[in-house]
Every structure is written in C-alpha cells, then in structure tokens.
Amino acid sequence: KGKRPLKGMKITRREPGGFSKDWYHTGDEGYLDEDGFLFITGRIKEMINRGGVKIIPTEVDQAALKHNAVREAVSFPIPHKTLGEDLALSIVLEEGETVSEGDLKNFLTEYLVPNKIPSRIIFVDEIKLL
C-alpha cells in the first residue's frame, strides 16, 4: 500500500487494474498460512476461465505430477464454443511407464474438484518451455 509500492518502479494510476483505494494489485494469487507466511500459487492473469470456473494451471499441474507415471505436466486453455475456454493437459510420462487418459483423469479426482479435471490429456515426448 502506498504511492510507490515497489522501489525503483514507476507506476501510475493510468495502468489498468493496478490501483484500488491506494493498494497496488500485483496479480499474484496466493495464501497466508497459519504462521503468517505468504505462499504464491500463481498469477491471476494466467487463470483459465472455464465457463466461470477459475482454474489456476499450476494447481492442475501439481496434481498430475503426484502420479508415479508422470514426469512433466503443463495445463493450458483451449478454445471452447460455449465455455469460452476449456482445460487441456500435456503429459510427459516417466520412461517405461504407461497410464491411460481415463485412468489419469480418475486419479486427478483425488486432488481436484470435478470442474478442474482436464477435458483433454495429450501425451507428448517433450514439453518445450519458452
């Protein structure tokens, strides 16, 4: 809170979505634990809006990574005619491991509410990060 919340940055009130009642909104999503420590879980701008359900991609990624067969996981939005955006998940399997799309979706129900289960799971050999 204040006129200059981040030292060295020049921030003006003309920036969209920046200020609200003298607070600067960074766009970070997170929570405070019982000891008062702040944990950043993602960015609001990275959220996928699946028909009004807000999905943080890293939440889906982390759930998928709990499966023994999954080495890498990246969720992302795909266009949908009525929902606006839908959820897809790319998976790299551990060497020698197999899992079906249905079995992985079933596994994810242990960690995610039904609206956050990806509609499509795409198995790939490699995920290239930009």
Image (tube, rainbow, N blue to C red):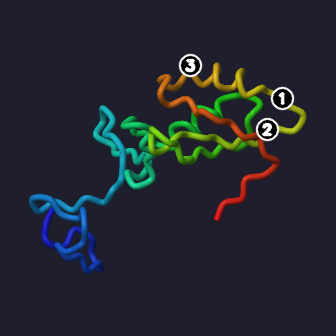
Q: Residue 128, how many percent across, how many down?
A: 72, 59
What residue is shown at x 24% (from left), y 72% (from top)?
Answer: 15
Please tell me in which quadrant of the rendered image residue 72 appears: top right
Q: Is residue 8 above or below residue 121?
A: below
Q: Which mark is residue 110?
A: 3
In the image: residue 6, left or right of residue 96: left
Badge 3 marks a residue whose secondary structure is loop
Q: CA distance from mark 2 to mark 3?
A: 19 Å
Please tell me in which quadrant of the rendered image residue 54 appears: top left
Q: In this figure, which residue is indicated by the disc labeled 1?
A: 98
What residue is shown at x 36% (from left), y 37% (from top)?
Answer: 52
Q: Are marks 2 and 1 in contact (CB under 8 Å)?
A: yes
Q: Amino acid at mark 2?
A: Leu
Q: Between 34 and 96, which is closer to the camera in this rendering?
A: 96
Mark 2: few, some, or many residues within 10 Å (few <14, many ≥20)? many
- Going from N to C along the chain, the mark reached first, 3 or 1, is 1
Q: In this figure, which residue is indicated by the disc labeled 2?
A: 93
Furthest residue to the left? Answer: 21
Mark 1: few, some, or many residues within 10 Å (few <14, many ≥20)? few
Q: Residue 28, how many percent across, how many down?
A: 36, 53
Mark 3: few, some, or many residues within 10 Å (few <14, many ≥20)? few
Q: CA distance from mark 3 to mark 1?
A: 19 Å
Q: Residue 43, how many percent across, how many down?
A: 41, 52
What residue is shown at x 85% (from left), y 31% (from top)?
Answer: 97
Please tell me in which quadrant of the rendered image residue 13 appears: bottom left
Q: CA distance from mark 2 to mark 1?
A: 7 Å
Q: Which mark is residue 109?
A: none
- Going from N to C along the chain, the mark reached first, 2 or 1, is 2
Badge 2 marks a residue whose secondary structure is strand
Q: Amino acid at mark 1?
A: Thr
Image quarter of the C terminus: bottom right
